[in-house]
Image (cartoon, rainbow, N blue to C red):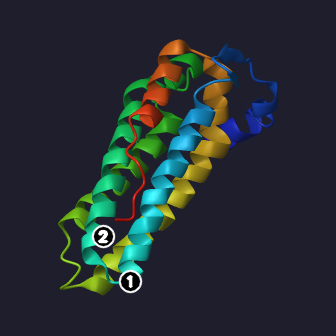
């Protein structure tokens, strides 16, 4: 069904209704959620760099920050965005079911990385981090190229969703490698 959505919404990003919010024009929550993806990517990159340098204290700090941000992001999607999409599309939970399953995989890996003992098993931690990278990359591609444009097309500039997505950015911690 994600393929169906992709085909059905091809080019949707170019034809979205827009709404003025402050000085910027927003079609829907997609651009805000994409911005938050990039913010989370920065924590992930710092965790990778710390693991490569065997800076396990920095690794644990960045994994904790990534875990917190992804938890907030996933909570918004699963509590607000996905139900609104399901209601507007009439597709019940099918497309978002895949996203929810991937969210569960990410949480499981983040829990394992948070509990890991990298000084005892550094290669195991690096391997789990690479597994998380693969899941995140594939997941983000599906959301950013298929689901988010479909949400923008179907949901437009719903204030509740825009405000919820913006809260992710507004409450996001600063990126720091220390």
Coordinates of residue 53 in the picture (x, y in percent): 38, 83
Position of 162 with respect to 157 (left or right) is left
Where disc 2 sits, the SS reads helix
Residue at image location 42% in from the left, 58% down from the top: 43
Q: What residue sits right under mark 2 in the picture?
A: 58
Question: How far apart in space, not on screen, are marks 2 and 1 (Cα)?
Answer: 10 Å
Question: Closest to the observer: 88 or 48?
Answer: 48
Question: Closest to the observer: 130 or 87?
Answer: 130
Residue at image location 81% in from the left, 31% down from the top: 14
- The disc, 2 or 1, on the residue closer to the chain's N-terminal end is 1
Where disc 1 sits, the SS reads loop
Q: What residue sits right under mark 1 in the picture?
A: 53
Coordinates of residue 76 in the picture (x, y in percent): 40, 31
Coordinates of residue 148 in the picture (x, y in percent): 61, 35
Report if the CB atoms under discs 2 and 1 are less than 8 Å apart.
yes
Mark 1 neighbour class, 10 Å CA radius: few under 14, some 14 to 19, many 20 or more:
few
Residue at image location 58% in from the left, 42% down from the top: 34
Question: Closest to the observer: 136 or 169?
Answer: 169
Position of 149 with respect to 135 (left or right) is right
| Image height of 128 relative to 32, above or below | below
Q: Report if residue 118 is visible in the image.
A: yes
Q: Report if residue 109 is visible in the image.
A: no
Question: Closest to the observer: 174 or 11?
Answer: 174
Q: Where on the picture, by quarter, is residue 109? A: bottom left
């Amino acid at each position: 069904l994600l393929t169906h959505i992709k085909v059905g919404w091809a080019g949707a990003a170019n034809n979205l209704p827009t709404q003025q919010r402050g000085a910027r024009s927003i079609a829907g929550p997609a651009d805000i959620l994409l911005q938050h993806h990039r913010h989370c990517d920065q924590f992930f990159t710092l965790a990778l760099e710390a693991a490569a340098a065997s800076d396990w204290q920095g690794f644990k700090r960045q994994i904790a920050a990534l875990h917190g941000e992804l938890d907030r992001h996933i909570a918004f999607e699963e509590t607000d965005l996905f139900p609104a999409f399901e209601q507007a599309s009439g597709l019940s939970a099918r497309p978002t079911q895949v996203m929810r399953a991937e969210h569960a995989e990410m949480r499981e890996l983040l829990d394992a990385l948070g509990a890991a003992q990298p000084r005892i098993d550094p290669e195991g931690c690096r391997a789990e981090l690479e597994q998380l990278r693969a899941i995140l990359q594939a997941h983000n591609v599906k959301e950013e190229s298929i689901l988010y444009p479909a949400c923008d097309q179907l949901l437009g500039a719903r204030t509740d969703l825009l405000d919820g997505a913006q809260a992710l950015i507004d409450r996001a911690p600063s990126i720091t490698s220390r």
